[in-house]
Amino acid sequence: MRRFLKPKPKVEKVVILPSEKPVGFIGTIKPPPKVNTVDRPIKRAKGQKVKPEELRHVRELMRRRYALDLELWELRNAGDYDYEVHTPKLEKADALLMRIQTIVFSMDHRDYFNNDSEWERFGELKKRVFQDGKRSWVKNPPWEDKEE
């Protein structure tokens, strides 16, 4: 007699970022639920500071997201036949935003900065990254804003 094995359910790996509450004026910010292994922020050892190269990397990611935003906004008059061609750009823009937010969330601790002025400047960056008004292109593509 042959036994039939039940297929194992697929389990997605979910990365949980540090459970400590972020310090600052924004309050409790929840990190994005899933983080690709490439996009995982580095784990900092005790006393390790945020390097200028890391902040420059975040700045470059923000510039790439902004450039994609402008490119996608120009597609608001695209025809129905173009939607599938531009969908990867929508996904890339949303992934960039999630990556930026994940990196900023991982830097959110006073001990990671050398002095109060650096911490305050980072607080302004954090406020802007997490404030409302960022468009999720996959959920709200530009061609849905067509004027009729």
Image (cartoon, grey):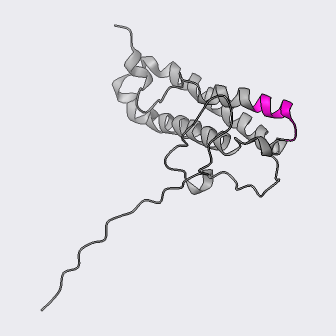
Which residues lie in the magenta part? 114-122
Q: List the single residue furthest toward the left.
A: 1
As drawn, is 35 to the left or to the right of 20?
left
As drawn, is 55 to the left or to the right of 95?
right
Q: Along the line of sight, which residue is nearer the eye, 127 or 73? A: 127
Is residue 35 depicted above or below 2 in this figure?
above
Residue that appears at 72% across and 30% down:
123
Residue that appears at 61% across and 54% down:
38
- Identify the image quadrant of residue 117: top right
Residue 68 x %, y % = 58, 29
Is residue 145 depicted above or below 86 in this figure?
above
Is residue 7 depicted above or below 106 in this figure?
below
Residue 13 x %, y % = 47, 60
Residue 59 x %, y % = 73, 34
- Identify the image quadrant of residue 121: top right
Q: Does the magenta segment cover residue 87?
A: no
Q: Along the line of sight, which residue is nearer the eye, 25 or 14? A: 25
Q: Magenta residues: mostly which secondary structure?
A: helix
Q: Which part of the image, by quadrant, shows the C terminus?
A: top left
Residue 138 x %, y % = 43, 33
Residue that appears at 77% across and 39% down:
55
Q: Does the magenta segment cover residue 118?
A: yes
